[in-house]
Image (cartoon, helix red, strand yellow):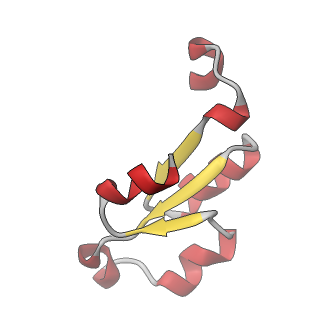
Amino acid sequence: KAMKLLNAQPNQTIVVGDTDKDIQAGKNADVTTVLFYPKVNHKFYRLEKLTQTQPDYIIEHFSQLLKIC
């Protein structure tokens, strides 16, 4: 819906999320996916489960997005 409102193309779009549902939503939209997995999330989420959705990238800091974009 956001892509349609912004008239964005899948190759111009990334989804950043911290759950497997976020990554799956990005995969369903056929866009690049980034799993945000900071140290604080290690106690709430298991990386093994989150990576089952096969995110394109995994980052711990938002500054790492600069290398992706």
The image position of residue 59, as x and y in percent, is 42, 67
Taking the image as shown, residue 66 lies to the left or right of residue 22, namely left
- For residue 4, which quarter of the picture? top right
Residue 22 % position (x, y): 54, 53
Quadrant placement of the N terminus: top right
16 to 36, vertically: above or below: above
Direction from residue 16 to residue 37 in the image, left or right: left
* Residue shown at 33% from the left, 82% from the top: 42
Q: Which residue is depicted at the point 56% across and 65% down?
A: 57
The answer to whether residue 15 is above or below residue 3 is below
> How many numbered badges does the structure rendering display?
0
Q: Is residue 33 left or right of residue 69?
A: right
Q: Quadrant of residue 55?
A: bottom right
Q: Is residue 64 above or below residue 45?
A: above
Q: Nearer the viewer, residue 22 or 55?
A: 55
**Closer to us: 27 or 64:** 64
Task: Name the residue furthest left.
Answer: 40
Outermost residue to the front = 67
Q: Residue at x 30, y 71 (%)?
A: 38
Give the percent coordinates (x, y) of residue 16.
Answer: 48, 50
Percent position of residue 13, x then y:
60, 36
